Amino acid sequence: MGFLSQFRQLINISRSHTIARRYLVVNGFDGALTTLGLLIGFYFNNVTDLKVSITACLGAAIALGMSGFSSAYVSEAAERRQEYEKLQDAMVTDMSGSTHEKARRWVPLIIAAVNGLSPMLISLIIIVPLWLTQNGYPIPLGAIETAIGLAFGIIFLLGVFLSNVSGRFWLISGLQTLAIALLTSFFIYLVV
Amino acid sequence: MILTKRLVLDILKPHHPDILEFARTIAARGAGYQVKIKVLEIDENTETLEVIIEGNNIEFELITSSIKEMGASLHSIDGVDVVNISDTESAIRD
């Protein structure tokens, strides 16, 4: 059996695709909003040193990634172990070597990777304009401003992605997440 | 040459994979395999099935390994159809 079909079987048997999708959005949203918060802070404080901005965002991205990975792994591993033991008791047989046993070992890692990588990758994408400017590719609208725009765009797209799940109209869903981002920016503006 | 044409198995399996996926996985083990499943009993975590497999030459070991891989366990073999074909017929088949 190929790697992909085995992967699909593990996800199907453990019914993990909905959990992974939920984590992808929830933690992706965390990553986008955290990076947006940092960028708004830099913008209102006129932080012009891009190295400082990049390092701060990178630090936040790594921390979000590690936090997402470890928290999801610990909780999912405990859940899966309990589920597997319950199933094994019901089956009154040794299930080692079965797809269920493989799922117990691998699914927590897969879900943890989704939970860790989604905020990290989204944060890294948002700070691309800062990197480009620092490496000699200036952006006409300004690096921080473009990165803020990118963050709003990604947050809107996460809302659109959620509309696929809930079956709601994509624009309403996108505008809803965008409104949360705007509200967050307003709160940050009030404190900086 | 002895060929197994039909097996009737009593199997206990978890709810996942469902019986459609279960039947497909067994059928995928050999060309021409026909799999019929009847759910006899459903519990909180498990279900008991009567699985009938028909084919020209059923490989029992492949079937049992598939069953184990899907987390199920074979309780009993409740029926078999086996034929002994002549050497000439066997050569033609080969």
Image (spheres, rainbow, N blue to C red):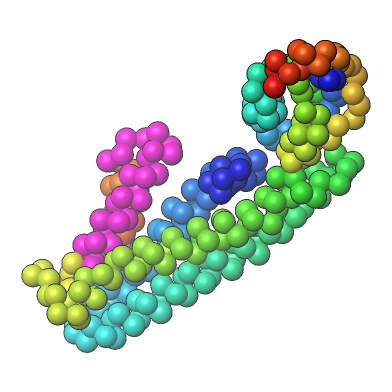
Residue A167 location, quadrant: top left
Residue at point 81%, 46% (across, down): A95
Q: In the figure, A165 relative to B40: above or below? A: below
Within the magenta stretch, is there residue A167?
Answer: yes
Residue A33: x percent and y percent? 36, 64
The residue shown at (86%, 32%) is: B74
Which of the pair A177/B4 is nearer the observer? B4
- Which picture quadrant has residue B13? top right
Residue A110 x/y as whole percent: 57, 56
What's drawn in magenta, residue-wise?
A: A147-171
Q: Quick check: can you spot residue A21?
A: yes
One can see residue B41 in this view: no
Q: Main secondary structure of the magenta part?
A: helix
**Residue A179 magenta-drawn?**
no
Relative horizontal placement of residue A43, taking residue A159 as reference (left or right): left
Give the quarter of the figure containing the C terminus of chain B: top right
With respect to residue A31, does A93 lie above or below?
Answer: above
Say whether residue A157 is left or right of residue A49: right
Residue B27: x %, y % from top left: 67, 25
The image shows residue A144 at horizontal and vertical percentages of: 20, 73
**Quick one: A156 or B71, which is closer to the camera?**
B71
Which of these two is toward me, A186 or B34?
B34
Q: Quadrant of residue B6?
A: top right
Q: Which quadrant is the N terminus of chain B positioned in?
A: top right
- Which residue does the image show at 68% across and 30% down from the upper left? B29
Question: For this view, does B69 lie left or right of residue A192?
Answer: right
